Image (spheres, rainbow, N blue to C red):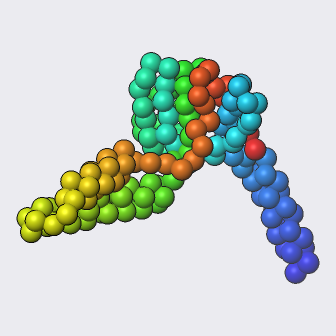
Amino acid sequence: MTNSLLKLSLFLFLLNLTYLAHGQSIALNVTNPKTGTTKTIQQNKRVKLRTLDGKRYTGKLQILENGSISVKGYAVALDNIYKLKKSPLIVSAITSGGLIYSGAVFVGIGGIVAIFGGPQPLLWMGIGGSLLYLGIKKPTFSKVTQDTAPLEVRIVKQ
């Protein structure tokens, strides 16, 4: 009985050691050279990415073995990243959906006010159009990690 318990304990200990040795997560360490701030973005997090040539990608971040990253199936070299910020799906969906819905309501009220000859229908429609534009533009409330110079991005194991 004690011999099998000892073997089980040894097996579980070695299994835990192998998990700790191989279970390191990979992340991106993003440094803004202008401000010196550093942020860490984990793999499989949603990000918004803009490259130096102006292409934009939004999707889950995958770190490839050759020192580059992949967003939505497109491989991007680390030295080609211009802007990078987190883009949580739930916050984006709620804010853009809420802004589109409220913009449609304001435009509808403006239409009703215009049909029945009420005051200021263009004001209602202008506010509604602005809210629709903001909702379609898909706002994110994460801070942009870059303004002018390319980011310093490197892959780290945690």
Residue found 12% across the figure and 61% down from its top: 114
Q: Nearer the viewer, residue 59 or 94?
A: 94
* Quarter of the image where one finds residue 111: bottom left
69 lies left or right of 16 = left
Give whichever of 51, 34 is nearer the camera. Answer: 34
Q: What residue do we see at 49% from left, 25% from top?
A: 51
The part of the image, by quadrant, that contains residue 92 is bottom left
Q: Position of residue 101 (x, y in %)?
A: 30, 63
Determine whether, in the image, residue 23 is placed left or right of residue 119.
Answer: right
Q: Position of residue 1 (x, y in %)?
A: 88, 81
Residue 67 seen in this snapshot: no
Q: Is residue 79 visible?
A: yes
Q: Nearer the viewer, residue 41 or 118?
A: 118
Identify the residue at image location x=55%, y=31%.
83
Residue at the image point whose x is 43% and y is 35% from the top: 57
Q: Report the number of discs.
A: 0
Out of 89 and 103, give the one closest to the viewer.
Answer: 103
Q: Position of residue 117 (x, y in %)?
A: 10, 65
Identity of the residue furthest to the left in this view: 115
Side of 114 where 56 appears, left or right: right
Q: Is residue 139 above or below residue 117?
A: above
